[in-house]
Amino acid sequence: MRLLIISHTAHYINKDGRFVGHSPTIKEINVLAHVFDEVIHLTFLHPGPAPPNVLPYEAENIRIITVPPSGGLTLKAKLQVIFKSHQYLKQIITLIPSADIIHVRCPGSLGLYGMVACSFVRNKQKWIKFAGNWKGKFGQIAPSHFFQREWLRLGLCHAMVTVNGIWEDQPDYVIPFLNPSADIKEIINAREKCTGKKLHPPYRIVFVGHTSPFKGLQIALRIIRQLNIDYPGQLIFDIIGDGPERFSLEEYVEKNNLRDVVQFHGWVAHSKVFDLLIPAHFILLPTMSEGWPKILSEAMMFGVVPLASAISSIPQLFLSIGTGIPILPIDENIYITNIRSLINNPNEWERMSKAGMNSAPQFSYERYLLAVDNIFRNFYGQSPLNQDFIAEVREIFSEVSELDLNRFWSD
């Protein structure tokens, strides 16, 4: 079976001449390559050197086809989505006939055209993955994201649509789905490194994401400034990420005498992110719009307690897992109050830390493959995934759940 993936994931060519891309997406596609004969990925190729937070493809049955990127924060970048539409549609229309399964990843500029093209395809199995905020109102999310969500919600793609969160009054083709973040081996390794983690000075707080107003780093820095007044010399704030606003944020750090507290790491390799999560106690993510950020499940895997925006599926998952505090991104004082409260009540922090680690298996790639197999079977009546491999995954996951995970996840 041949799988066609259409996504806006940023790709580059590294010094070895290989395609590399955004680490979480590449890991997910490498996993999907195990259960299809061939995977074709139509995606964006960016010029210039690859940033550190990328990975190469591991599977040999993945074929990359690229088009020029479009979209962004500026008006010129947004207009490119329209100007390059003929290039995108030409490639999509050329590739669809040879694919058995079409997988479109939204929201995104290339996903938008893939989604519309899918609406005219009736004889193939289709899976649209909407990773953004499924319930945000117009004005709370980008207009293009709102358009894509409404197109999908109305069923115009005639496809199954997986979304973050469980929502009332949704049609049968809108299916709740968890995004994976690590494999079982990584989860067990994280648990081994973080078992017995305690909350004590220096209190380590981390932020991961683009250094833009949309992601809320400015809010996070104001929170850190106040906490540093309350706990002088007892804080470390690690910022993983980069963007055009970094210079002004570094100026803010200097102006507020936070240079001994705040560490800008820029974009780093995925393994380095894990290294910084091992000693971390809290992760701040006061973002304006998200579906379910994978960094939250990665952080919880290491026993990091998240404080994140009360939007989309974030409050639902925090409640079901028993960890994390959902807060409106504009409520800086509520963030500060809750961090103070947990510092003053380390037993509650430890309970949340353990609950987050206990949730890790549900965000594993093994469980992800079983879930993908299940949703295809339920929606289309049959699964296109390699059933021999799925049987192996099911057996391994069952054995690990009963043995290794019980050894680590028992109370």
Image (cartoon, rainbow, N blue to C red):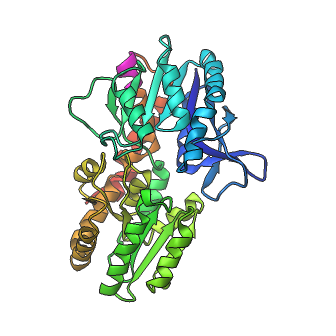
- Residue situated furthest bottom in the rendering: 233
Residue 388 seen in render: no
Taking 266 as reference, is 7 above or below it?
above
- Could you tell me which residue is drawn at 58 percent across and 26 percent down? 4
Question: Taking 165 as reference, is 264 left or right?
Answer: right
Quadrant for the N terminus in the image: top right
- Name the foreground residue: 99 vs 155: 155
- Residue situated furthest top in the rendering: 123
Question: Taking 151 as reference, is 241 left or right?
Answer: right
- Name the foreground residue: 397 vs 124: 124
- Could you tell me which residue is drawn at 49 percent across and 54 percent down? 186
Residue 161 seen in render: yes
- Could you tell me which residue is drawn at 48 percent across and 79 percent down? 253
Quadrant for the C terminus in the image: bottom left
* Residue range (magenta): 374-381
Question: In the rendering, at what x and y percent does residue 86 appear?
Answer: 64, 26
Question: In the rendering, at what x and y percent does residue 25 appear?
Answer: 54, 44
Prevailing secondary structure of the magenta residues: helix
- Name the foreground residue: 331 vs 163: 331
Q: Quadrant of residue 338?
A: bottom left
Total labels drawn = 0
Q: Quadrant of residue 277?
A: bottom left
- Residue situated furthest right in the rendering: 16
- Could you tell me which residue is drawn at 23 percent across and 68 percent down? 334
- Name the foreground residue: 172 vs 155: 155
Would you say residue 85 sits in the magenta stretch?
A: no
Question: In the rendering, at what x and y percent does residue 297 appear?
Answer: 39, 54
Would you say residue 377 sits in the magenta stretch?
A: yes
Taking 154 as reference, is 109 above or below it?
below
Taking 332 as reference, is 133 above or below it?
above
